């Protein structure tokens, strides 16, 4: 485009004038079109589309110069319109300038005069176009910046972390929605606001430290209590391009859940430590006594002590495997191997396996399958078996000799329902509410003599829930207990 | 010692320890009364006075042994009865109850502190020492 010659249109009904102008302009390197009247001029103008300068004679047939000027101006605001006029018509030329002509050239004129006006006009045109380009670009940039600003503000506001920006004069200059929620005292106040407005001394301190460290930018990270939670505050200096500090930005992240998790974890470890240490201490103490030979030799008594060691060691082993399963379930590492499973059949196997134990304790163990409907669910055989093993095992453990344990399998609308009911010692409401807790064991004279880990029912609940099922308990002290498991069918 | 067997009350929710201590102490001429809960022990203590109390630490509550010890110390009828805490918790993570100085022990209202597993000789030594102290106190 820039290499193409500037195209000029000469519109004059006088052939001599047209030719004269054409020659002068062509000699100067311009491309020149000519037209004998206004209508033709407009046609030529539209046909070429790249005409930058139009020389207009005001007196032309068909479409007069004045009309042509307006028509051209309408089509292209940047075209340079020059009126060629006789000295007598100067007033009209002025009028034409008002309507959009760039200037006029009084006739007669010298070639240089014409060229000068054309050059001036073109320069003017270039300047106008450049100015407009710049203006448009600036406007576009401004729009972009404005959009970016609202965008980043929206992003900052949508962050779940609280964000605070403080300038070097210890004034809050920005606080996002999360920060307003966290520190209601700075929610409604106009900015900038004094740092002192913030109630938390810890937050003020960490910002002050960051502001104070001007020479060496330092990032401070601290855990602080805020409201009812625990927050991790991370403050860093806001640095200019040459490294000077403009202030500090603090990000406040809610780590309450994490802190609670960490506390729960160490609580769990403490409990494991205690639960593991107790049977170990018992075993070791028995062995100490047996080995020290203190208290004479009573083979009957020694045998009983060794048997107790055996019981405690077995419990310990059960506990370790239960702990491994529990941790696997909790960390999501326990992968269920689901296949169509006949729950009724698994329950029957479990009940069968406990027949001897029940007989030994003189407990009547029965299984009832209500209806002949199929009891297939998509489930992990081992997990389901351990669920019912635990429930039947507990029912037998916590039922004194002479009692009954009834297992029933039935099909409900959307689930297979298995209940294990015993006539045992039952539970108080307090005990009932805690049976599914890790390590919980009811403490009374009866349970004290029953070995257990307090993890069995935790696992039962976790396994059942992994299958989107539920487990509930009904029990009264001395009236026996009933555990009910529901597993959804047709998944 | 006046020839009369000394009575040791033992509270522990682990029946194996009750069995163990009974075997050990009765084998050494003590009389034992054992309980699986603070409640049962407290009830018995209402109208009995043992020569020594041995208590587990972590029973129905984390520090059940210490509050039981304090209760014993607060009973006028049990004045001068030494309390020995025996525990498997010891310094399990985050649960460091082990007193390190006599002052700390006193703050816990206990006269002695032993960790499980118990060695028969250590336990007997400690019990004799405590009964000796208690005996002297009774003389003065
Ligand atoms: N059928 C039941 N009857 C009475 N109490 C029960 C029964 N099943 C469980 N419990 C109570 O719930 C506690 C937790 O059970 P569980 O998690 O299986 O651990 P444990 O190894 O002690 O049996 C038991 O210690 C017992 O106090």
Image (cartoon, coloured by chain):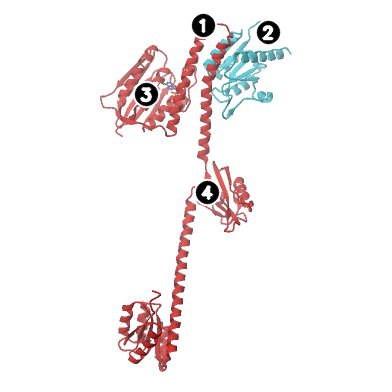
Chain colours: A red, B cyan
| Position in image of residue A426 (x %, y %) | 43, 20
Q: CA distance from mark 1 to mark 3?
A: 39 Å
Residue indicated by mark 2: B1
- SS type, badge 3: helix
- Which of disc 4 and disc 3 is earlier in sequence? 4
2 or 1: mark nearer the eye? 1
Residue indicated by mark 3: A388
Q: Chain of mark 1?
A: A
A211 displayed left or right of A322: right
Residue indicated by mark 1: A299
Please tell me how many numbered marks the rendered image carries: 4
The residue shown at (55%, 44%) is A232
Q: CA distance from mark 3 to mark 4?
A: 49 Å
- SS type, badge 2: loop
Circle 4 Cα neighbour tier, 10 Å, few/some/many (<14 / 14–19 / ≥20)? many
Are tags 1 and 3 found on a single chain? yes
Q: Does residue A451 appear anywhere in the picture? A: no
- Which of disc 3 and disc 1 is earlier in sequence? 1
Q: Chain of mark 3?
A: A
Circle 1 Cα neighbour tier, 10 Å, few/some/many (<14 / 14–19 / ≥20)? few
Circle 3 Cα neighbour tier, 10 Å, few/some/many (<14 / 14–19 / ≥20)? many
Residue indicated by mark 4: A162
Mark 1 close to ligand 1, CB under 8 Å: no
| Position in image of residue A184 (x %, y %) | 55, 49
Mark 2 close to ligand 1, CB under 8 Å: no
Q: Chain of mark 2?
A: B
């Amino acid at each position: 485009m820039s290499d193409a010659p500037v195209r000029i249109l000469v519109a004059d009904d006088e052939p001599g004038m047209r030719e004269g102008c054409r020659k002068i302009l062509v000699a100067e390197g311009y491309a020149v079109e000519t037209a004998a009247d206004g209508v033709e001029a407009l046609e030529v103008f539209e046909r070429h589309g790249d005409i930058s300068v139009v020389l207009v004679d005001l007196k032309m047939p068909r479409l007069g110069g004045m009309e042509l000027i307006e028509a051209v101006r309408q089509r292209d605001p940047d075209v340079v319109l020059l009126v060629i006029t006789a000295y007598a018509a100067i007033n009209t030329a002025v009028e034409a300038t008002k309507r959009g002509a760039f200037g006029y050239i009084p006739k007669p004129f010298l070639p240089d005069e014409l060229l000068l006006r054309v050059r001036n006009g073109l320069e003017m045109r270039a300047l106008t176009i450049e100015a407009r380009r710049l203006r448009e670009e600036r406007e576009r940039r401004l729009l972009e910046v404005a959009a970016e600003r609202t965008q980043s503000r929206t992003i900052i506001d949508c962050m779940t972390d609280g964000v605070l920006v403080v300038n070097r004069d210890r004034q809050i200059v920005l606080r996002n929605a999360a920060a307003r929620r966290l520190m209601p005292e700075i929610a409604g106040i106009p900015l900038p606001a004094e740092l002192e407005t913030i109630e938390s001394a810890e937050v003020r301190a960490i910002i002050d430290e960051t502001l104070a460290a001007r020479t060496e930018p330092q990032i401070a990270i601290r855990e602080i209590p805020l409201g009812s939670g625990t927050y991790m505050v991370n403050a860093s200096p806001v640095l200019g391009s040459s490294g000077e500090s403009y202030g500090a930005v603090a990000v406040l992240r809610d780590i309450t859940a994490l802190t609670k998790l960490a506390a729960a974890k160490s609580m769990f470890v403490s409990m494991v430590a205690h639960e593991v240490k107790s049977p170990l201490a018992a075993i070791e103490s028995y062995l100490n006594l047996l080995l020290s030979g203190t208290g004479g030799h009573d083979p009957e008594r020694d045998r009983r002590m060794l048997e107790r060691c055996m019981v405690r060691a077995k419990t310990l082993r059960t506990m370790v495997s239960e702990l491994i399963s529990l941790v696997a379930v909790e960390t999501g590492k326990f992968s269920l191997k689901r296949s169509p499973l006949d729950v009724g059949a698994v329950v029957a196997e479990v009940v069968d396996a406990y027949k001897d134990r029940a007989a030994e304790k003189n407990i009547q163990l029965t299984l009832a399958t209500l209806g002949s409907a199929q009891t297939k669910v998509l489930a992990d055989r081992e997990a389901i078996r351990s669920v019912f093993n635990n429930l039947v095992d507990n029912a037998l453990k916590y039922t004194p000799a002479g009692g009954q344990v009834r297992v029933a399998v039935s099909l409900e609308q959307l689930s297979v329902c298995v209940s294990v009911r015993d006539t045992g010692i039952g539970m108080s409401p307090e005990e009932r509410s805690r049976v599914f807790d890790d390590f919980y064991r009811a403490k009374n004279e009866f349970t004290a003599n029953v070995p257990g880990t307090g993890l069995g029912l935790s696992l039962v609940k976790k396994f059942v829930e992994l299958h989107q099922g539920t487990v509930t308990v009904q029990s009264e002290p001395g009236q026996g207990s009933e555990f009910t498991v529901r597993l959804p069918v047709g998944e | 010692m006046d020839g009369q067997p000394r009575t040791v009350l033992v509270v522990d929710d682990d029946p194996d320890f009750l069995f163990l201590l009974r075997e050990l102490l009765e084998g050494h001429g003590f009389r034992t009364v054992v309980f699986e809960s603070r409640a049962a022990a407290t009830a018995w203590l209402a109208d009995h006075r043992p020569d020594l109390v041995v208590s587990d630490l972590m029973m129905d509550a984390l520090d059940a042994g210490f509050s039981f010890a304090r209760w014993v110390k607060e009973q006028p009828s049990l004045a001068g009865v030494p309390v020995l805490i025996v525990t498997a918790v010891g310094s399990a993570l985050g649960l460091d109850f082990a007193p390190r100085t006599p002052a700390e022990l006193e703050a816990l209202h206990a006269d002695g502190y032993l960790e499980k597993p118990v060695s028969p000789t250590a336990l007997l030594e400690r019990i004799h020492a405590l009964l000796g102290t208690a005996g002297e106190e009774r003389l003065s």
